[in-house]
Amino acid sequence: MLNFAVGPVQSEDDVRALGALNVPYFRTPEFSTTMLENEQMICELAKAPKGSRAVFVTGSGTAGMETVVAGTLSAEDKALVVDGGSFGHRFVQLLELHNIFHTVIKLNYGTSLTAADLEPYQNQGYTAFLVNLGETSQGILYDAELISAFCKANNLFWIADCVSSFLADPFDMASLGVDVMITGSQKALACPPGISPLVLSPKAVTKITGIKAPCMYLDLNLLLQNGERGQTPFTPAVQTLLQIHKRLSNIVKAGGVDAENARIAVLAKDFRERAQSLPFKMRLVSPSNAVTFLSTGNYSAKMLFQVLKDEYGMWICPNGGENADTSFRVGHIGAHELSDNAVLVAAIHDVQRRGLLTTRE
Ligand SMILES: *Cc1c(COP(=O)(O)O)cnc(C)c1O
């Protein structure tokens, strides 16, 4: 199968090969060394400020989001949260569940965040800002510089969900002043699902120390303490962590995060050029390099997904909710060649030629 979903995505061969091995025992100096290297490499790739820490939460990206909401915020916080799609909405649900005071900045889905959206919340006593820099469900990348200036001016603790944008879009944690960067193993990290890496600024590490999270497996204080010796409090997704080590090492060797950003940007640009020939409309409002959102108009996106899956051996990325039959997405993350884009676009033309691009009911 050729996989254009936005996660899980295709992995490099040497990352996949590790998945075939038996899972080693992990309370060893060797595994601790691997983990300490993982921490060092991910901080470097996030361009984290000096003194930052990283922990690796076992679970998908949502587990990382929940760990952060439960472990870095408390009753003393007053949070602002951007809801511009299903992942932003997830932060809102987590703040509700964990009883953190919050105000929602609700966007019309499919639009980006503007200075006017933030303006009413200047100097209103907020303490924290939660946003998913890449709103994967809409294919939109918010303006990190705009948010950075707002957070700095209002002294906000900035939690950035970069689950799909990390490695795909430019990101400089130190210069932006981000306090917590959340990502996931199955997006641009291109490993199997199971780990949510979190990068924590020195300010975040200090804040966490003063908070008692209402959970045990996702307790950031425990994760940080155990991480000092390259370990986790409980059994983690050991195999995925070893695959992450291979993948991070490969990125570092190939020129680091800027080179990886550039590689993904080329894939996205190439697809967007080729996709001009398709009978769909691309949404190119502030697009992330990770994904392209396409509207199918009268054509059934669900049927297209099914035909490509069953007859061409390809997965495109379906959308949920109201958009489910009128749009789909194409991911540019994972181990892809430029030629994969050509193969996908040719397949969609072939579906149309065969009369299988059907109109919606
Ligand atoms: C994929 C993703 C997540 C996490 O989703 P999981 O299914 O829990 O891995 C969170 N935020 C964004 C922006 C994502 O793209």
Image (cartoon, grey):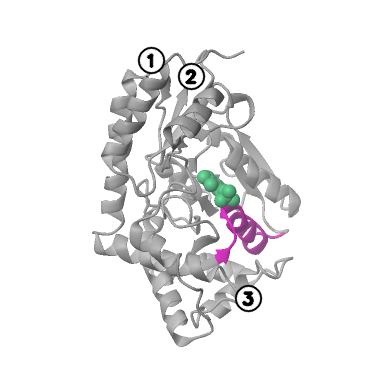
Q: Is residue 66 left or right of residue 302?
A: right
Query: Looking at the picture, which amino acid does disc 3 mark?
Result: Phe
Looking at marks 2 and 3 on the same chain, the residue that comes earlier in the sequence is marked by 3
1 or 3: mark nearer the eye:
1
Q: Is residue 70 left or right of residue 200?
A: right
The structure residue drawn at horizontal position 36% and vertical position 20%, both measured from the top left corner, is 349
**Residue picked out by circle 2:** 296
**Residue picked out by circle 3:** 234
The segment highlighted magenta reads 57-74
The image shows residue 164, relative to residue 344, as above or below, that is below
**Residue picked out by circle 1:** 353
Spatial separation of the CA atoms under disc 1 and disc 2: 16 Å
Report the label total: 3
Residue 254 badge: none
- The quadrant of the picture occupied by the N terminus is top left
Q: Position of residue 329 (x, y in %)?
A: 47, 32
Q: Is residue 66 magenta?
A: yes
Q: Is residue 337 visible?
A: yes
Query: Looking at the picture, which amino acid does disc 2 mark?
Result: Thr
Q: Residues within 10 Å of mark 1 (few under 14, many from 20)?
A: few
Q: Is residue 165 magenta?
A: no
Look at the numbered disc 3 and give the secondary structure of its residue: loop
Looking at marks 1 and 2 on the same chain, the residue that comes earlier in the sequence is marked by 2
Spatial separation of the CA atoms under disc 1 and disc 3: 54 Å
Q: Is residue 114 visible?
A: no
Q: Position of residue 93 (x, y in %)?
A: 70, 45
**Quadrant in the picture for residue 39:** bottom left
Query: Looking at the picture, which amino acid does disc 1 mark?
Result: Arg
The structure residue drawn at horizontal position 31% and vertical position 60%, both measured from the top left corner, is 251
Magenta highlight: main SS: helix
